[in-house]
Amino acid sequence: MTILLQLQNDLERAKALDDPNHNVCYFALADQNGLPSVRTLVLRSISHSSLTLFSNKTSPKWEILTANPCCQILLWYPSIQIQYRLSGNCSALAQDSLENDWQRRPDKSKLLDYFYQSGHPQSGPIESRTVLTHGLKTLGKKMPVEELKMPASAGAFTVEIQQVDYLRLTQNEEPHFRERHTKKETNWSTETLVP
């Protein structure tokens, strides 16, 4: 079993236990000044070699990823005491895949994509929360969500995983279990690590 298949199985176990982290990840980049930059994102999908994450193209992280596609993703499932730290490179998701995935997004996420293009870029300052909520309500009245088409600013990226650091915490006198899995072409190698 590859480490990413194991990850999919652990995610399903965490979800079955109502783990609060089952659908999110912690996404780390180095910003334009080389400073660490971490945020929580919704984890859209995991395949045998990559993860998919959404980001509007007005977001500062889109510009950062365009300049430097290296990233790291942390998954922590407290219900099963397992952590995955995944390192890889980002690339924009193909337009046809993006359009299919965009239609399955929650209504509020679709409206936000339109709100971003109306002069309020993702992560940009806004006068108040009231301006945000009122703007979204107004958009929802003008543009029924069921009729929305994906705007040009909608984006997503895949992270091609090159390395996985796996940690399983133990609750006894045994040391924690830790491994590093590294992808070379299409094969994975595994090293046991000191926790």
Image (cartoon, helix red, strand yellow):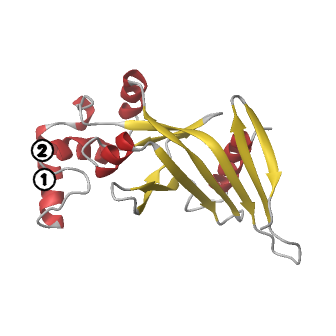
Q: In front: 76, or 135?
A: 76
Residue at image point 12% right, 61% down: 131
Residue at image point 36% right, 33% down: 102
Report the residue that reaches farthest toward the right. Answer: 174
- Residue position for label 2: 118
Q: In front: 174, or 28?
A: 28
Question: Callout 1, which amino acid?
Answer: Gly
Dot 2: what SS? loop
20 with respect to 14 (left or right): left
**Disc number for residue 60:** none
Dot 1: what SS? helix
Residue at image point 14% right, 65% down: 130
- Residue position for label 1: 135
Image quadrant containing the C terminus: bottom right
**Mark with earlier residue (1, 2):** 2
- Determine whether 25 is above or below 140 in the image: below
Label 1, label 2: how many angstroms apart (C-alpha)? 10 Å
Q: Dividing the picture into quarters, in which one does residue 173 lie?
A: bottom right
Question: Callout 2, which amino acid?
Answer: Ser
| Position in image of residue 54 (x %, y %) | 40, 42
Residue at image point 72% right, 62% down: 80
- Determine whether 149 is above or below 191 in the image: above
Using the rendered image of the protein, determine whether residue 144 is visible from the camera's viewpoint: yes
| Position in image of residue 58 (x %, y %) | 24, 45
| Position in image of residue 22 (x %, y %) | 58, 55
